[in-house]
Image (cartoon, rainbow, N blue to C red):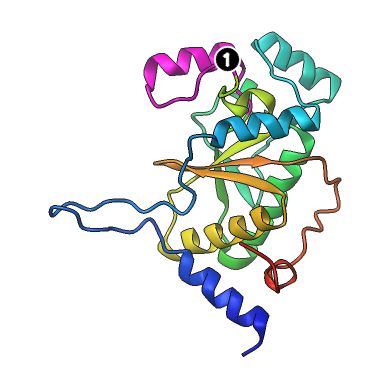
Amino acid sequence: MSKSTLVLALALLLCVPASARVRRGRPRETKNFPAQTNSVALENQVAEEMGVSRYFTQAEVDEAVYSGRLAALYDHAQYKVSPKLPINRRYALPATVNFVLQLSSEFWDEFETPLMVDSAIRPATTQKWLIRRNRNAAPAYGVRASSHERGTTVDFSKKLTQAQYQWLVYRLLYYRAIGRVLVIEERACLHVFVKGDYGDTGNYGEPAEALDGGVL
């Protein structure tokens, strides 16, 4: 067995689905990308290094869309946007939209079904409103404010089969290993922060290239 094949096998073993761990007779979810104390602060630090600022109001988002700084997430053959997501928030940075296209195309090639995008840009005023409805939501301001305010981040729905979930976790492990993304797994979605602007080529490589001698 080659070194890359062995590492790939180990990676797949790590990619268990949202599984049940029995504790006092009740199932407990095991997350592959659990949130850490500094997870959101790290996203904001990386965003600052990228030179990406926050959008505080919907008017600022609308102006960024008009000027081309934010790109649209349309329903696509390979991915869909949740009908619950307002049309004026179906935008993200071009690099993030490119990543969605790349990942969803790979997912489609494997399963012939689209990924679902649940959330994208979210200005601070919307985040502040969300906090009133969801006590687990990130703050609207400060070093731990939601990275959705910057357009770097999208949420992928976890309404997937076991095989689809395992595949998606493995691919996100790979993209995290090569420095493309930061990931936080939430109860209903995978929150994915996309780093940098990698152009329109969609050339993100193959798993063996990063896993051979690399670190997951």
Task: Specify the segment rendered in magenta.
Answer: 121-142
Q: Residue at x 38, y 18 (%)?
A: 133
Dot 1 corresponds to which residue? 141
| 26 in magenta | no
Task: Identify the image quadrant of residue 56.
Answer: top right
Foreground of the two, 6 or 197: 6
Secondary structure under the numbered disc 1 in the rendered image? loop
Kindly identify the residue that appears in the image at 86 percent across and 45 percent down: 199
Name the residue furthest front. 37
Asked whether, in this view, residue 64 is left or right of residue 78, the answer is: right
Q: Which quarter shows the N terminus?
A: bottom right
- Please identify the quadrant where the C terminus is shown: bottom right
Q: Quadrant of residue 125?
A: top right
Is the residue marked by circle 1 packed among few (<14), some (14-19), or many (20+) residues within 10 Å? some
Q: From the viewer's perspective, is residue 167 above or below residue 152? A: below
| Residue type beneath disc 1 | Tyr
In x, y percent, where is residue 191?
54, 40
Q: Position of residue 35 (x, y in %)?
A: 47, 41
In the picture, measured across the screen, residue 185 lies left or right of residue 207, that is left
Indicate the quadrant where residue 95 lies: top right
The x, y position of residue 21, in whole percent, is 26, 58
Q: Nearer the viewer, residue 120 or 212?
A: 212
Residue 150, position as x, y percentages in the image: 68, 25
Name, please, the residue furthest toward the left: 25
The extreme bottom residue here reads 1
* Residue 9 appears left or right of 99: left
Please name the residue shown 77% across and 58% down the image. 204
- Magenta-span inclusion, residue 139: yes
Residue shown at 54%/15% (left/top)? Answer: 126
State left or right for residue 48 relative to residue 146: right
